Amino acid sequence: MTVLEQFKQDGRILIGRGLYIQADDLHEDFIRASGPGGQNVNKVSTAVQLRFALSAAPLPEDIKERAALLAGSRLTHSGEIVLQADRFRTRERNREDALTRLLALLQRALEKPKPRKATRPTLASKRRRLDSKKKRGSVKKLRGKGASFD
């Protein structure tokens, strides 16, 4: 069952860990796609602009924060994630594409990032770094003024 079929049947999509996106949280606009394509592109609104109200969604705050970071420039000032899908010629495939991409973004937001362990550089890596610095310095030292032939 595709994401779109599940969404049509249940009116919601399972993200993971018992969390769902409700149909009310999504808003779809159908717009004309850009690029080549002749009459199909110029006449038919097959591209999908999917809006997900992240700020109003019933998700835990930490997941909302990670989703906002992952969304980047696709997050509006009003707290909506806007995805545009126009890769395919049909409206249904573009809807499926937009929903799948939103689902993937939210599933990545569910994963808590592992805390970074502070490590120290090894003695060998320090030695390699210093050797390359000395080598680079000696190359630069050779770039002196040329001998004068006067």
Image (tube, rainbow, N blue to C red):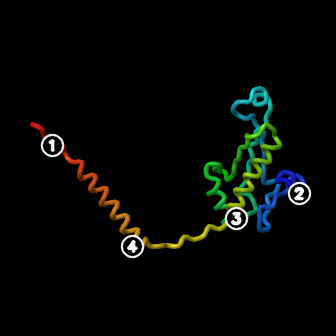
In the rendered image, residue 150, in percent from the top left (x then y), is placed at 9, 36
> Could you give the CA–CA distance between mark 2 and mark 4, rounded to whole angstroms?
59 Å
Mark 1 vs mark 4: in front: 1
Q: Amino acid at mark 4?
A: Leu
Q: Amino acid at mark 2?
A: Asp
- Dot placed on the residue nearer the N-terminal end, 1 or 3: 3
Side of 47 relative to 78 (left or right): right
Mark 4 vs mark 3: in front: 4
Mark 2 vs mark 4: in front: 4
In the rendered image, residue 60, in percent from the top left (x then y), is placed at 71, 66
> Could you give the CA–CA distance between mark 2 and mark 1, rounded to whole angstroms?
84 Å
- Residue at figure coordinates x 73%, y 51% from the top left: 101
- Dot placed on the residue nearer the N-terminal end, 4 or 3: 3
Q: Amino acid at mark 1?
A: Ala
Residue that carries the numbered disc 2 in the rendered image: 10
> Could you give the CA–CA distance between mark 3 and mark 2, rounded to whole angstroms?
22 Å
- Residue at figure coordinates x 75%, y 59% from the top left: 57
Residue that carries the numbered disc 4 in the rendered image: 123
Q: Identify the disc placed on residue 147.
A: 1
> Callout 3: 10 Å neighbours few (<14), some, many (20+)?
some
Between 133 and 110, the residue placed more toward the observer is 133
Q: Secondary structure at mark 3?
A: helix
> Callout 2: 10 Å neighbours few (<14), some, many (20+)?
few
Residue 44 occupies which quadrant of the picture? top right
Q: Secondary structure at mark 1?
A: loop
Q: Secondary structure at mark 2?
A: helix
Residue 110 occupies which quadrant of the picture? bottom right
> Relative to 94, is 55 above or below?
below
> Relative to 102, is 92 above or below?
above
Q: Identify the disc placed on residue 110.
A: 3
In the rendered image, residue 94, in percent from the top left (x then y), is placed at 78, 43
